[in-house]
């Protein structure tokens, strides 16, 4: 009756083992480390960077405990701060020969002291949020109206060019806020403009009217298109901020949307507010120029001659020199979109570029005069330029054209991202900033840890006194619940904040509530005259429906917080929801396994160690006669 099959115990053992492995990294603490990340959006951190770091440290006689490479940085962990500071100086000298134009950022950081076998299993500790680690917090307001104004100006130029191509004369195109007014002398021009808008501008809606002898078309952006443009601008700004913040060497920045037009930026571990502001407000610009393919230009590329007059020398992403003319054809202001795709003929990855009317007109004229010549796309950051790509012009270009060639899918995505994220899609301003000191963060960690542990110990003492051996089983199940909660958060690489610690403390109370229901139900069966084995079986089975109902209703509230909340509320909701799921496993499945293991093999069981089973007064009176 009260025996688990072997496969159920196997599940319990596997879950406990996995939970222990992935929770362990949180108990080793942190060690001083040095982090190397890209200072420019065009620099990649890869295995070659890791090798350079390893060779530089070896030459200096420094042996890191751990050297890791992730998607954005190389990190070297040391045993003490002296080696950390020496390594920082060594890597700074080896990787940043010119401090005025640094390709990499060498920053001090902290890494978990987890042994290498845990790291090999991808077992990492939870990240600590701003309120626990210290750092800076910015709230940025995005000027959505500015983004729409900019797009309306682009539409006005495109309409002006389209009407010129249709040979519609005697028109005037002016932008008034986010609307565009087009005036005509006759109805023929009006009808032509309507057809043009319907064919080429599906995001615009037009309202015709007449003012005296003139005809007017008032054009505005459709509401759904405006929302789509605003959402795209916000996402592009977030992407741009991610690229810029890599320079700060922050291990786990939080950059997320808040509401419809705000962005929260949290930088744990950063105390230099001025530098953070400078990074967030930095501008990057794109330029398109022709490559100097004269004999002198080719000689300069090969290093056998000087750079010709009227040209400049830049390096591409592989370090090779490219000689480009000083004349700027178009800038990033003229680029409206960049998306990846596949060439329909060669099936090779490509990047589709979309220019505004002015840029399209320039590209059309330039491509006609420079067929089969190369055009370089440069990105400028901090006044220094770098060539992203220099493809050949293989056809007449216009508002829309593509870049293709020797690119794989990853390189095409990177190029499109750099082209889109070179500058902000909409202006932003910092409307709120906050700095949390590291000492305050350490104090918050200690207080949060104390609140969880004291609450856990108090509940455990009460349960052991009130429910005897069943209270011990409940306490062990509660410890398993806490272990699994920490393990899952670590596996998800969640960021732990003060609200998350509060949710952990609440999860302990919710978890023990299920055990209280089970224990009281077992007592109730014993009071009704059931045998101990029958009382255990009925107690768990009949308490299950109540436990399920209470946990599901609590989970609904947690999901609502997760769906509609933001920031700290979402952090609380995530821990709360995970805690409910783990409590159902530990309080029901695991605790019953313990009870079955202890009592299940006892065929002639007479009593249960579950505390005093109080009987109603009428039963006591009847028994005394």
Image (tube, rainbow, N blue to C red):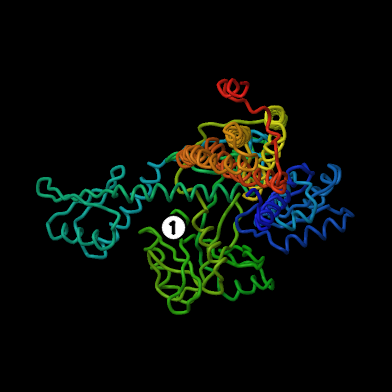
Q: Secondary structure at mark 1?
A: strand
Image vertical order of residue 299 relative to residue 110, above or below: below
Residue at label 1?
335
Residue at 25 percent of width and 51 percent of height: 173
User: Which residue extends farthest front?
Assistant: 625
Q: Residue 495 sits in which quadrant?
A: top right
Q: Residue furthest right?
A: 61
**Image location of residue 402, percent across then percent down:** 45, 69
Disc 1: CA contacts within 10 A as few (<14), some (14-19) or many (>=20): many
Residue 454, image x and y in percent? 71, 28
Nearest the viewer among 594 and 338 is 594
Quadrant (top left, top right, bottom left, bottom right) of the C terminus: top right
Which of these two is toward me, 90 or 621?
621
Q: In the figure, is residue 315 to the left or right of 24?
A: left
Residue 40 position within the rendered picture, expressed as x and y whole percent measured from the top left: 63, 54
Most extreme residue toward the left is: 213
Residue nearer the viewer, 79 or 186? 79
Residue at x 32%, y 55% (from the top left corner): 157
Q: Is residue 344 left or right of residue 515?
A: left
Above or below residue 247? Residue 301 is below
343 to 287, vertically: above or below: below
């Amino acid at each position: 009756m009260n025996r688990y099959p072997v496969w159920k115990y196997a599940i319990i053992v596997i879950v406990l083992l996995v939970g222990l492995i992935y929770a362990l990294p949180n108990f080793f603490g942190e060690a001083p480390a040095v982090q190397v990340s890209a200072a420019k959006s065009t620099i990649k951190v890869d295995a070659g960077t890791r090798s350079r770091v390893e060779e530089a440290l070896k030459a200096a006689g420094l042996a890191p405990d751990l050297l890791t490479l992730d998607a954005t940085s190389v990190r070297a962990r040391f045993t003490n701060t002296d080696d950390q500071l020496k390594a920082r100086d060594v890597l700074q000298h080896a990787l940043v020969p010119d401090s005025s134009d640094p390709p990499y950022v060498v920053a001090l950081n902290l890494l978990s002291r987890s042994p290498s076998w845990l790291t090999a299993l991808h077992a990492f500790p939870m990240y600590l949020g701003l309120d626990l680690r210290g750092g800076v917090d910015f709230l940025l307001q995005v000027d959505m109206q500015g983004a729409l104004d900019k797009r309306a100006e682009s539409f006005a130029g495109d309409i002006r060019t389209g009407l010129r191509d249709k040979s519609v004369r005697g028109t005037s195109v002016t932008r008034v806020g986010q609307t565009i007014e087009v005036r005509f002398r006759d109805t023929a021009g009006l009808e032509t403009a309507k057809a043009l808008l319907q064919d080429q501008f599906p995001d615009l809606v037009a309202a015709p009217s007449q003012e005296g002898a003139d005809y007017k078309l008032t054009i505005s952006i459709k509401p759904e298109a405006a929302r789509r443009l605003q959402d795209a601008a916000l996402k592009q700004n977030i992407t741009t901020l991610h690229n810029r913040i890599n320079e700060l060497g922050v291990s786990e920045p939080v950059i997320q949307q808040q509401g419809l037009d705000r962005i929260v930026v949290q930088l744990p571990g950063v105390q230099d507010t001025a530098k953070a502001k400078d990074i967030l407000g930095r501008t990057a610009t794109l330029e398109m120029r022709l490559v100097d393919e004269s004999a002198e230009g080719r000689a300069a590329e090969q290093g056998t001659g000087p750079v010709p007059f009227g040209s400049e020398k830049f390096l591409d992403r592989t370090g090779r020199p490219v000689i480009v003319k000083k004349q700027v054809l178009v800038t990033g202001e003229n680029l409206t979109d960049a998306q990846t795709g596949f060439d329909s003929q060669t099936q090779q990855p490509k990047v589709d570029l979309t220019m505004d009317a002015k840029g399209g007109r320039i590209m059309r004229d330039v491509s006609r005069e420079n067929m089969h010549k190369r055009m370089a796309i440069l990105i400028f950051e901090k006044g220094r330029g770098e060539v992203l790509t220099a493809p050949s012009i293989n056809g007449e270009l216009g508002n829309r054209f593509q870049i293709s060639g020797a690119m794989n899918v990853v390189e095409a995505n990177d190029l499109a991202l750099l082209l889109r994220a070179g500058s902000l899609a909409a202006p932003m301003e910092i409307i709120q900033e906050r700095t949390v000191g590291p000492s305050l963060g350490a104090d918050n960690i200690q207080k949060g840890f104390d609140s969880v542990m004291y609450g856990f110990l108090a509940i455990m003492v009460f349960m052991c006194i009130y429910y005897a051996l069943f209270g011990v089983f409940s306490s062990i199940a509660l410890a398993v619940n806490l272990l699994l909660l920490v393990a899952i958060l670590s596996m998800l690489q969640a960021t732990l904040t003060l609200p998350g610690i509060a949710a952990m403390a609440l999860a302990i109370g919710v978890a023990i509530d299920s055990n209280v229901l089970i224990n009281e139900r077992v007592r109730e069966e014993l009071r009704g005259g059931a045998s101990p084995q029958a009382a255990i079986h009925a107690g768990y089975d009949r308490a299950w429906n109540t436990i399920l109902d209470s946990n599901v209703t609590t989970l609904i509230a947690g999901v609502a917080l997760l769906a509609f909340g933001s920031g700290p509320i979402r952090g609380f909701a995530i821990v709360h929801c995970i805690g409910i799921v783990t409590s159902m496993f530990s309080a029901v499945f695991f605790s019953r396994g313990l009870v079955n293991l202890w009592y299940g093999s006892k065929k002639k069981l007479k009593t249960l160690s579950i505390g005093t089973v109080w009987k109603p007064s009428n039963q006591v009176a009847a028994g005394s006669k």
